């Protein structure tokens, strides 16, 4: 079967940030389901920023042998001998939990070796940018019926990350009806899923972006308003948009870092929550006395547990929520088209997820 990995031109890892590993289409043995595993024919896989970081050698444990990508959906074609009621899985469409080693603890992964995310590293030997993959039956969920293959593949990692950052970390009272939630950097997959979840939970959602078009698109998706963070005094402008009687935000969901603690000190209520799932501006972020005096909780959040994954998928099904898919390319062997998705991510031009259609639900290979 076909799989896509990164390759090193000279066979040696490059200096972080100074390389851009090319994609390599490989022929590898088709796996067979063993024990409690399901064999899944992947129909679609989706990119995340970690995949770009892997190509730039900015992510730990880069592997030239492990297929890329953590997001995937597909059709179960066989089941191992230890799978209970295998007939309930065969020919069913499923989505894959994007990591292992984290069952249900709210604090973090229970595994002593940590959380192992699928795709592109030595920490987990499997990825979703391949035609078939074996996954333990305990790590899949039936795909929501209202989602097509591309949407189903777009859901797992960003949906899980957004759910934990919003619901688990910001907290129930700060993320449902009556709450005001700010989501920064709208346009990325996690930010958009956080918007979808918060709006569906009844919260008043506001967003920031450097793109006026993205702000307009976010409002069409349920945001109450938004501001361009490159404008002087954007934080004051946001406070002026809040409903009558609401003076501050209850929670901020942020993926950039930078000076967000300083901004949060002015934007959040006393005891408000700043939930940070990424730091794309800088790997360091100052913590100010202003935040201490205002009793602001700054909480790091990354991915999520198997329980949170199920809770997220169940909510998506109940609310008929759809991930936003920005662009889909056809065929796992179409390296130039897949490369162009990475180019979109490098430029930050996307509004939603970037997806590779590997095959159709009918099982036929997807070609241009």
Image (spheres, rainbow, N blue to C red):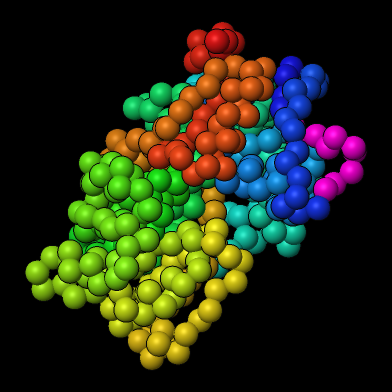
Q: Quadrant of residue 198?
A: bottom left
Residue drawn at (66%, 22%) of the image: 335
Depth check: give the residue in front, 152 or 223. Answer: 223
Give whichever of 243, 340 is nearer the camera. 340
Residue 61 makes an appearance in the image? yes
Q: Residue at x 76, y 45 (%)?
A: 19
Answer with the quarter of the image where residue 144 lies: top left
Say left or right for 15 vs 171.
Answer: right
Q: Left or right of 144: which side holds 104?
A: right
98 vs 37: above or below: below
Q: Is residue 202 visible?
A: no
Bounds of the magenta span? 5-14
Which residue is outermost to the front? Answer: 232
Q: Quadrant of the C terminus?
A: top right
**Residue 351 spot, x, y in % from top left:** 40, 39
Is residue 13 rendered magenta in the image? yes
The answer to whether residue 309 is left or right of residue 52 is: left
Residue 334 drawn at (x, y percent): 64, 18
């Amino acid at each position: 079967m076909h799989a896509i990995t990164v390759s090193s031109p000279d066979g040696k890892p490059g200096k972080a940030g100074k390389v851009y590993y090319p994609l390599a289409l490989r022929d590898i043995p088709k796996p067979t389901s063993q024990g409690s595993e399901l064999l899944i024919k992947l129909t679609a896989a989706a990119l995340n920023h970690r995949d770009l970081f892997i190509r730039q050698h900015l992510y730990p444990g880069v592997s030239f042998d492990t297929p890329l990508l953590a997001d995937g959906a597909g059709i179960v074609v066989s089941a191992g001998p230890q799978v209970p009621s295998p007939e309930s899985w065969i020919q069913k469409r499923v989505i894959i939990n994007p990591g292992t080693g984290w069952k249900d603890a709210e604090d973090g992964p229970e595994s002593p070796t940590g959380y192992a995310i699928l795709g592109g590293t030595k920490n987990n030997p499997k990825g979703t940018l391949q035609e078939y993959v074996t996954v333990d039956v305990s790590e899949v969920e039936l795909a929501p019926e209202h989602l097509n293959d591309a949407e189903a593949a777009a859901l797992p990692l960003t949906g899980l990350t957004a759910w934990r950052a919003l619901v688990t970390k910001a907290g129930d009272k700060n993320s449902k009806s009556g709450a005001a939630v700010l989501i920064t950097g709208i346009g990325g997959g996690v930010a958009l899923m956080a918007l979808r979840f918060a709006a569906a939970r009844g919260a008043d959602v506001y967003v920031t972006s450097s793109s006026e078009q993205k702000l307009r698109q976010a409002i069409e998706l349920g945001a109450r308003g938004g501001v361009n963070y490159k404008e002087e005094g954007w934080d004051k402008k946001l406070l002026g948009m809040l409903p009558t009687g609401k003076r501050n935000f209850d929670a901020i969901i942020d993926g950039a870092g930078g000076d967000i603690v300083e901004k949060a000190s002015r934007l959040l209520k006393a005891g408000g929550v700043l939930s940070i799932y990424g730091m794309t501006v800088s790997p360091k972020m100052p913590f100010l006395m202003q935040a201490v005096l205002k009793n602001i909780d700054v909480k790091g959040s990354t991915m999520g547990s198997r329980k949170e994954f199920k809770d997220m998928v169940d909510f998506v099904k109940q609310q008929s929520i759809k991930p936003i898919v920005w662009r889909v390319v056809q065929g796992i062997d179409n390296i130039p088209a897949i490369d162009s998705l990475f180019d979109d991510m490098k430029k930050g031009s996307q509004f939603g997820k970037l997806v590779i259609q590997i095959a159709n639900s009918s099982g036929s290979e997807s070609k241009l």
